[in-house]
Amino acid sequence: MSDLLKDKFQRKERRISKVPSEGGHGARGKETRTKDSISTVSCIDELVQQDDNARMAVTMENTYQLGPYKRFPVLAVTDILKDVLTTYLQQEKYEVEWSQKMTKTLSEVIRARVKDLMIPRYKIVVLVHIGQLTGQSMQISSRCLWDASNDTFASYSFKNSSLFGLATVFAVYFE
């Protein structure tokens, strides 16, 4: 077992000694230039990654994109909410067990349809509430950390003779 460790150490030493130094300060690196950015990759980091035989981690350059290229389409998402809630809840009567399952189903359907719009760099959160109409009033509120310039939401409420449904989609921009 110790022979394997010694061999590995010796191979690593040979690789390090073969790499020429590019500066007087002992800094070894190669500089690559792309269209708008400069990045420096350390040779020692490359050697460590090769020796571990682990899956190579993909490192991405920062885009420095502070705003979305494509805005979140609130009207299109509102139309999706209206269509889904009307289709699934139009002829239904309120039942407790049914409403628990239906909220999960509706949120998954809405999330899938919103993701089909392929809006880049937005995290999607879907909330669905179903309740019985018995003459009561109800207020639903939410709070979150919000960037008013990029984050947004869409909401739609539906009522029939025995139940109400409220669906909200929050779109949070991911920098």
Image (tube, rainbow, N blue to C red):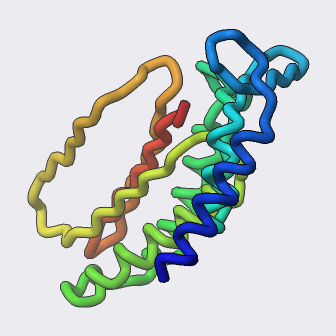
Q: Quadrant of the C terminus?
A: top right
Count how many numbered circles sit on residues in the image: 0
Look at 42% across and 57% down and name the residue there: 126
Q: Position of residue 40 (x, y in %)?
A: 72, 24
Looking at the image, which is closer to me, 107 or 60?
60
- From the viewer's perspective, tell me whether residue 166 is left or right of residue 134: right
The furthest residue to the right: 35
Q: Position of residue 170 (x, y in %)?
A: 43, 44
Look at 80% across and 41% down and name the residue there: 18
The furthest residue to the top: 24
Looking at the image, which is closer to me, 9 or 69?
9
- From the viewer's perspective, tell me whether residue 24 is left or right of residue 140: right
Q: Position of residue 155 (x, y in %)?
A: 43, 46
Look at 70% across and 25% down and name the residue there: 28
Q: Is residue 112 above or below residue 3?
A: above
Task: Tell me if residue 156 can be seen.
Answer: no
